Image (spheres, grey):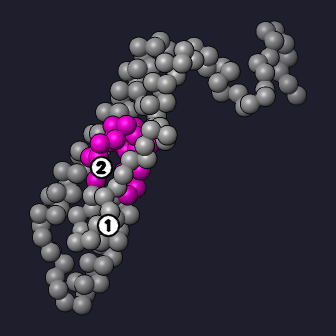
Amino acid sequence: MSRADLLTCAKAFRDESTGLIGDVGRQLEKLASLGAFMGDDDAGKDFKKGYESSMIKTVNALNALANVFSTLAHEGGGLLVPPVEEPGAPPKPPGRDMLGIAERIEGMVKNNKAADWGSSLLPTGVSTPEKGSDPPR
């Protein structure tokens, strides 16, 4: 893969990250526009409690997935907030010390390690075999 190919891949991961948040955000807005559809009787209150708990967990998982793809895409905010009465503190991206896939690919390009795939996949302390040698047993 060329450096340009790697940068294209990094952009694709960043686009997927922002696309996921945008697409799900629009669906959450539609769901929130339905209002209090669960009712206010005991069954509705029980449903609401379970719904809100599940919605918070789902949104947190989607934010985490978006951050796996690209942390810096959401550095200024822009992550999902659950459409519930008490969503808690707004989510924060993990920051520059916790890079997503897009940023790691870009780092490979910047560090000129893009062509060194073979040695980058080996565990620490393992050397590459000599050309023409038998594989280890």
Q: Is residue 23 above or below residue 14?
A: below
Q: Nearer the viewer, residue 86 or 121?
A: 86
Indicate left or right for 65 with 22 as reference: right
The label number, if any, that marks residue 79 in the structure image: 2
Which residue type carries mark 2?
Answer: Leu
Query: Looking at the picture, how far across and down is residue 27, in whole percent?
Result: 20, 54
Where 119 sits versus 65, above or below? above
Seen in the image, is 50 located left or right of residue 122?
Answer: left
Q: Residue furthest bottom?
A: 42
Q: Which residue is mark 1?
A: 88
> Quarter-wise, where is residue 10 in the image?
top left
> Which quadrant: the C terminus?
top right
Magenta residues span: 60-80
135 displayed left or right of 75: right
Q: Position of residue 63 (x, y in %)?
A: 36, 51
> Residue at the top extreme?
132
Please tell me whether residue 64 belongs to the stretch shown in magenta: yes
The crowding category of the residue bearing disc 2, from other C-alpha atoms within 10 Å (few below 14, some 14 to 19, many at least 20), is many
Q: Is residue 24 magenta?
A: no
Identified at 70% across, 27% down, the residue is 122
- The percent coordinates of residue 23 (x first, y second) are 23, 46
Asked which secondary structure carries label 2, the reply is loop
Q: Is residue 82 above or below residue 135?
A: below
Mark 2 and mark 1 lie on one chain; the one further toward the N terminus is 2
Magenta: main secondary structure equals helix
Q: Residue at x 30, y 72 (%)?
A: 51
What type is the residue that disc 1 sits on?
A: Gly
Q: Nearer the viewer, residue 135 or 115?
A: 115
The answer to whether residue 55 of the structure is visible from this angle is: no
Q: CA distance from mark 2 to mark 1?
A: 13 Å
